[in-house]
């Protein structure tokens, strides 16, 4: 994964990579939305790259994968997919859709908090609202899972993971293009918050991140 270094969200050579390439025949609004993603400036803790996008969800799709990195440790990771259907989609109530997966490892006592799912969902909506963004037709799930190891793996400590899957319709602006750079920045705010990092700038001191520093387990 190529580090964004607090500047652009694209990696060197990504325009020509099989994962990052957007066909010249793609609609102009989609191409503009992708260019905005590539030009977004992100926190230096974020490492981000283009990845292969799903082919069956919409006529046009672009995907990014990212991780919050502290030294050699991944604190959280996720994937953000931009979908576009020029004909519109009844379920989306628009022509664009953002789909995401975010996950992080938790301390077991944090995973046992009964309010954790509601708090994590509020982080997503709060990250968008903090940047003045709307999340039309938002839907998703928050899942927590625990693993206990036995036999030859018995020496491993129990592990707990939180996972957010969500999708929403970004408001379209001039030329029918949503502000995808701002949505990506808000998504990275969520990724950093679930990783346990403090806010990057002035903000509400009542917002609390998860106090954990475990990296997500490799699938």
Image: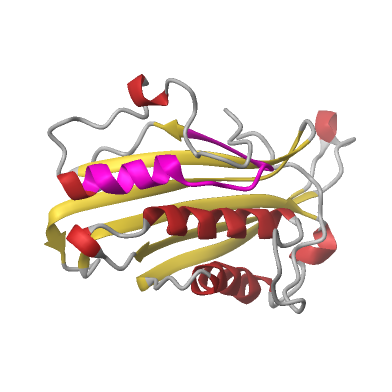
**Front residue (pair 164, 177):** 177
Figure coloring: secondary structure
Badge count: 0
- Residue 34's spot in the image, x, y percent? 32, 43
Where residue 64 sits in the image (x, y, percent)? 45, 40
Using residue 148 as the reference point, say whether residue 169 is left or right of it. left
- Location of residue 52 in the rendering, given as x and y in whole percent from the top left corner: 37, 31
Q: Based on the picture, tell me whether residue 37 belongs to the magenta stretch.
A: yes
Q: Locate residue 215: give its quadrant.
A: top right
* 55 up-or-down from 116: above or below: above
Find residue 175 and report its image quarter: bottom left
Residue found 60% across the figure and 35% down from its top: 219
- Name the quadrant of the N terminus: top right
Identify the residue at horizontal 69%, vertical 39% (top origin). 217
Residue at the left extreme, as displayed: 87
Query: Which image quadrant is residue 179 in?
Result: bottom left
Please provide percent x and percent y for residue 7: 57, 40
Answer yes or no: is residue 18 visible. Answer: no
- Residue that appears at 27% across and 46% down: 32
Residue name at image x 43 percent, y 53 percent = 181
Q: Is residue 206 magenta?
A: no
In the image, which residues are magenta?
30-49
Q: For residue 17, say whether it is visible.
A: yes
Horizontal placement of 31 versus 48: left or right?
left
């Amino acid at each position: 994964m190529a580090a964004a270094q607090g500047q652009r969200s694209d990696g060197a050579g990504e325009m020509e990579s099989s994962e990052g390439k957007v066909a010249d025949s793609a609609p102009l609004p989609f191409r503009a939305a992708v260019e905005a993603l590539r030009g977004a400036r992100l926190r230096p803790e974020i490492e981000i790259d283009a990845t292969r996008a799903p082919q069956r969800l919409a006529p046009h799709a672009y995907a990014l994968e990212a991780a919050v990195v502290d030294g050699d440790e991944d604190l959280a990771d996720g994937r953000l997919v931009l979908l576009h259907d020029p004909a519109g989609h009844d379920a989306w109530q628009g022509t664009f859709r953002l789909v995401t997966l975010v996950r992080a490892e938790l301390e077991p006592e944090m995973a046992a908090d009964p309010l954790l799912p509601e708090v994590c969902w509020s982080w997503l909506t709060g990250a968008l609202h903090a940047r003045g963004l709307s999340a039309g037709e938002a839907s998703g799930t928050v899942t927590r899972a625990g693993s206990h190891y036995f036999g030859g793996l018995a020496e491993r400590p129990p592990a707990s993971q939180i996972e957010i899957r969500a999708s929403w319709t970004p408001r379209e602006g001039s030329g029918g293009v949503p502000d995808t750079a701002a949505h990506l920045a808000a998504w990275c705010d969520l990724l950093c918050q679930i990783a346990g990092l403090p806010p990057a700038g002035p903000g509400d001191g009542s917002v609390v991140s998860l106090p954990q520093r475990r990296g997500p387990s490799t699938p």
